[in-house]
Image (tube, grey):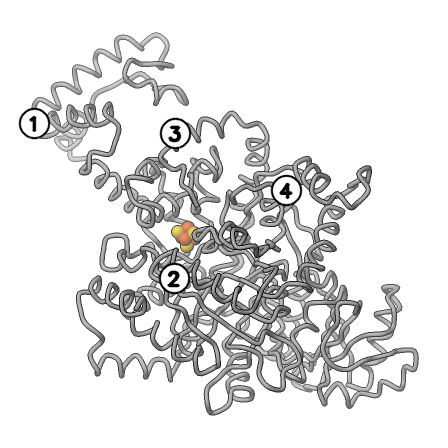
Amino acid sequence: MLATSPAFKQNAAHAMADGGLQKALARTRPTFPARRASAVANLPEFEQLREIGKQIKNHTLQNLDFYLEIFAGNVERAGGQVHWCSTADDARAAVLGICQRVGAKTVTKGKSMISEELGINKHLEAHDIVPVETDLGEYILQLRDEPPSHIIAPAFHLNREDWEASFRQSHTDLPADRVFVERRDILTEARTRLRQKFLAADVGITGANFLIAETGTSVIVTNEGNGDLTQTLPHVHIVLASIEKMVPTLEDTVSLLRLLARSATGQDFSVYTTFSTGPKRAADLDGPAEYHVILLDNGRSAMVGTEFQDMLRCIRCAACMNHCPVYGTVGGHAYGWVYPGPMGAVLTPSLIGVDQAGQLPNASTFCGKCESVCPMKIPLPNMMRHWREKEFERHLSPQGMRRGLSVWGWFARRPGVYRFATRMAMWGLGALGRKRGKFTSLPLAGGWTEGRDLPAPEGDTFFARYAREQRAGRA
Amino acid sequence: MSREAILGAIQRGLRRGPLPDDQAMALRARLNAHPRHLIPARSRVPRPEQVALFIRNLEKEFSTVARVPEGSEVPGAVADYLAGQNLPSDFAMAAHPELQALPWESRPLLRRREGKAEASDLVTVQHGYAGIAETGTLMLPGGPQRPTTLNLLADTAIVVLRASRVVGAYEEAFDLLRAELVPASGIMPRNVMLVTGPSRSADIESTLELGAHGPRRLHVVLVDDDAAAVG
Ligand code: SF4
């Protein structure tokens, strides 16, 4: 997928002017946090489970090479095949190779962010194989040739009008004047249409929420059941999974599952949590005859042992973006690549390079909400800060910002001058703003005051006040 | 090639070579022991309450439940449910000995076919392997006697489950699975589904609609074969 992340600022401005998107955001913003909060409130052990989840993933990452090999061995013992792929190119070639070998004409797909990372649809199309997205949200995005804007609610940015228009435009064999009375009618049309595709497909491609070393199993979690139809009906099942999806045992997996749905949709458990191990057995009446796991690295192994290793604990629940004020204002497309929101701001520079995605870690108010809801306790704001430092070191931040920061740095290294200068600035601002109590615009701070007012200072600087209170024995 | 590259990169990141033997042994021991973590207290309750919790959670997630005192009443419960919903009385049923042993002839209007589901089936009857009280979840391991398509293809999915098979937590259901369905080779059944309610989607304007790609209705016939579970 081609990244437009370098244009984050323009993308964001565009998003804020997009009426349809703003309507969708206004509808979605409050729902996810409310649902999560009620699910969490119903499980008194949630906080303890977060800590356990973190420990499980840390343990796995410390021994990732070991568990990957155990996993691969167990997949093969169950009759499946593992394809180790360092890069997106390797993975695309492996998928295409399997599809071509079995003479596949159509391929159904369950929802998979890795498949977005690989841009697998375009690759298959280029080789005359028709990919069909079967997750309802992904299906309409495919009709509209748009990328997902959210990792679990890919089409939340669309409104009912958009659904109806796209269906009328694409399903041309149906009467053009049919009426969609309720949302259910849209759903029913998609269900009927996709049912035929499920039955006709030669290969089914799904993602994986977890890979279990102990049993050589891949796990998918869905509400629609599309992933299950995708992996059950065709002759071949291909699992696309990145290496950090690894978990040691079934017990470890269910502990993480207790966190996943609650953090994601606010359900206690998703409707379908399915464990797949190898191909159909001799006596089985259904299931695929071939089972393949595409084990993708694509930049993740390079994060091991760095300050970004914690990001590999992510279970893709989307809680961080659901609670992020920046995401809630600009939506997902502005981030310009596969992963949006706080997790995307940290992960994207790791996967496609800080030169491409260096703007994203700046898309934060550092309010800390993402970290506080992350079920895996990933220190997202901290890691964004790491990226900002790196970006600065590599001279990638914009000229104006670099100049401003070096001026600030000069003062910061000279505490006496710093205090004097801030006191002067405060007097100045205080005197200027005393009447109105606030500034709606300030020279050199246009970006800041555009979206909010700066209250005029009323008292002293922090330093002066701190020193005074110290002396009074209060601080 | 890629395999060595990936493993090598991970080891470089961890600043070590392949795991030393003693550490690898400790990890293998952990895999063999597969220790449990914290199990939420909500399912740590006496049997009758466990079954009641299971039923409450089923209903919370939009399933319906009929509780019958013994297996001989299952065909009647199925027939009544289908009639009540205005559904046809033919269905595809799992060829499981427990289901086959039920007195289906007591309801001559019911027509059943055994085996996997076909695209044209409107109703399926599946054998419930275990129920998990903590979230009202059914465990349905696939196999010749419990084909996976029976969980997915029809508009209406009926699952017959014995109350003695209701456990508290996921871990307990997997213990049953390990003891009964995982052979000495350690290979799991090809497919194990945990199902919590009928299929649904909130992809259109973040509003929940039932019946996305899987069943629109999930009906559980719970057979009270466990005296200790009847409160
Ligand atoms: S970073 Fe945390 S909150 Fe965000 S998607 Fe990953 S696990 Fe969920």
**Chain letter of disc 1?**
A
Crowding near the residue tagged with mark 4, few <14, some 14–19, many ≥20 C-alpha atoms within 10 Å: some
Same-chain check, marks 4 and 3: no
Front position in the image: B111 or A237: A237
Q: Along the polypeptide, which appears first: circle 1 or circle 2?
A: 2
**Chain letter of disc 2?**
A
Q: Position of residue A307 (x, y in %)?
A: 24, 52
Residue type at the position of mark 4 = Glu
Residue type at the position of mark 2 = Leu
Q: Is residue A151 left or right of residue A3?
A: right
Residue type at the position of mark 1 = Arg
Query: Helix, strand, or loop for circle 1?
Result: loop
Q: Is residue A233 left or right of residue A14?
A: right
Q: Which mark is residue A414?
A: 1
Front position in the image: A68 or A29: A68
Q: Label 1 vs label 2: CA separation?
A: 49 Å
Discs 4, 2 touching: Cβ within 8 Å: no
- Residue in the picture at 48% in, 55% down: A115
Q: Label 4 vs label 2: CA separation?
A: 33 Å
Q: Is residue A473 left or right of residue A155?
A: left
Q: Label 1 vs label 4: CA separation?
A: 54 Å
Q: Label 2 vs label 3: CA separation?
A: 31 Å
